[in-house]
Amino acid sequence: MSSVISEPSASILANPALCVLLEQWSDLLDPAQYYLAVETNAAGDCLSVLAQGPAATTPAHQVLNSNGLWQALPAESHALIKALLTPATDQTTQQCIQIACDQLGVQWLECRVHYFLHGQNEPRCLLLVRDVSQTHQAALLYQQEKQRVRDYDRFKFSMLELILKEQDTEHILAWIVGEIEALHPETFCAIVLTQDLGQRVQTVIAPSLPSPLLQTLQQLKLEAGNGSLATAIATRQRVMVENVMIHPYWQYHRTAAQASGVQGGWAEPILNAAGEVLGAFALYSRQVQLPTAAEQSLIGQAARLVSIVVDRHLSQQSMQTLAYLEPVSGLPNRKKMYEVLHALRHQSAAEQHGGLIYIDLDHFKWVNEAHGHNAGNTLLQQVAQRLQKAAQPHFIACMGGDEFLILLSGLSTQKDKAVQQVWALQRKLHKTLQRPFNVAGLKLPVTASMGLCSFSGTDMDETDYVKAADIALHKAKQSGRNHACLYEPGMQTEIATQARLEAELREAIVQQQLRVYYQVQVDHTGRPFGAEVLLRWQHPTQGLISPLQFIAVAESSGLIVEIGMWVLDQACAQIAVWQRAQKTRELSLSVNISARQFRQANFTAMVKACLQRHQINPNALRLELTESLLLENVDDAVRIMTELSQSGIQFSLDDFGTGYSSLQYLKKLPLYQLKIDRSFVNDIVTDSHDRTIVRTIIAMAQSMYLGVIAEGVETPEQLELLLNNGCRRYQGYLFGKPMPIDAFNDWLQQALV
């Protein structure tokens, strides 16, 4: 005890338990803070002073006076302590409360009372009072920090979701500024966007910034040493100025800062993926101070997220001018074709005929595989030029990839003659493709399958025209490549074809014609960590059939449930084999789960039974689900996924980014990773919009502590861009094609050396 003013009373000394309590309490005391220990009767009269700290203002002898105890205690505590001196019940032996002694809650007293009997059962109290303001302050700071973390997490989630949904860039940036100022009320926030790679100020977004400093930013010369923000842009580095009134960077802006009530200025450059300057993010403090570590983290992360918003804005600007152009061929795109076709249908006279020629290059994928995507793109550009020249004056569009559609207008009013005119143009197109194309020093021969149709102004709507030409195109492909076919109503045989395919698929299950193939998944070092299980159909006459040709039939017929469980069983069996070997025991397998399979009432039971049957580590099994599947019933999806997750199974969200991609449902799901769809990876090197989407997905995954893997990685350039943006897991032809298990295991043994 720091200062014993008088000897403890005999009544205290006679009670060993009270002596122990008094000693324990004394160990908690801070000698510099207020404390007081007294013995009182039930009326609150002080009978003896046991301890009194140096911060006390009332001498011990005065405390012993009739009102001396209450003079020694803050007035705000009197009523509560007097109530405390009376036990709540006969069985109450002690009570303790903490009292705020001022309106601001700066000073807090802990008041502890122990009840005991003296002599002839006279009620007495041991009153122990000590200052606990520092403990309260620490707890308050801790709660404030917890709230700040929660607010910041909410801010990040809301910002990422706004980036995905909102198209108005300026609105997004203004929202970010407002949210950050709400998180840090003692600061002003500003986002400055630049032109010409950081040479000139283009836009200043700072709704709350006082006018003197706002005008300064709008007219700012972006040179090093000309304020925090300009220096950050010029040097591409973070700038932290504690006191703008004495720092040399602010020598020309101190008047504006003083008029705006600004004392500190911190700035972070906003850079795109290539490291080019897009602008800067700035915080201006009303106090002379440097940012805390948390504030520095906020500044850096906010600048990176703002760069995603600005990057997307720039890509959208260019996309608006290219909205109707297919980027590789330079021709009008599918959207433009439908608009022209719609206008033609409504402008043409009822007896006027038109025509369509749908063109698909034969085996174009082989060109990409043999010579690379650059050669493939060059070939498409040359094909587009020839077709456009041959088709004049008719309208031509690229429908995507290696598909082209030509719209013939102004044909004969007689149907037979109109059909002859369509055939005449087809022959011209066929001839123009006969000459080889010169690509990268190679002479590449090209053939094409073509579907033709003619129509009058009142036959069908524009989508039916294109569908008719597409049906004719598929008929031409069935006849062998380099053929053309004219649409006839009798070609509407898709239902019959589907019935035949379903019957063959049922037979394939019975005859065990289905096969599982494995495509490797690797990390950023190139080391395999797992594979995806892919389904193939070994048809007795047609050979190996891709699932693209039969999965839709399997889904609609319900066969997908049986097929899906067979694939899952094959995967678990293979995991069991791998887990018995040292080299492969850590490998995982990803299995696609169909919507119909997932919705089965006994789905979780069947999956658990499969795990039990093969006795595998469930962490090695990864189930891939699509966004559309989950959105059908989010609550059911969460329930099923949670139950299986508790068994150790991991979930991957497949084709992420092609659907709704909302954080509102994403946060509910027990996911392990997001899978970036190949449609974004394909053109990530050449399409800034796809790059922005990929960066957003990666940032979202990282903010939610989810893994991320990219599929369809086929070139080193794609790999480098993904790695630089934080994606460290990949799948695609760059690392390995899908293989049967024997070939895959042989390849795996080499890769794992």
Image (cartoon, rainbow, N blue to C red):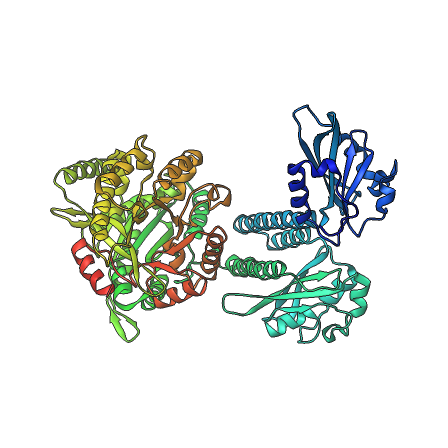
Q: Residue furthest top?
A: 90
Camera-nearest residue between 169 and 643: 643
User: Would you identify the image quadrant in which residue 514 lies?
Assistant: top left
Question: Is any atom of residue 489 visible in this view?
Answer: no
Question: From this viewpoint, is residue 554 visible?
Answer: yes
Residue 626 coordinates in the image, percent (x, y): 37, 44
Q: Is residue 446 above or below residue 494?
A: below
- Nearest the viewer among 686 and 657 is 657
Query: In the picture provided, is 328 more to the left or to the right than 31?
Result: left
Q: Is residue 57 left or right of residue 554?
A: right
Closer to us: 268 or 291: 291
Q: Image point 20% across, 57% down: which residue?
A: 744
Q: State whether residue 285 is above or below residue 478.
A: below
User: Horizontal and vertical percent for residue 317?
Assistant: 55, 59
**Residue 361 drawn at (x, y percent):** 28, 58
Q: Quadrant of residue 348?
A: top left
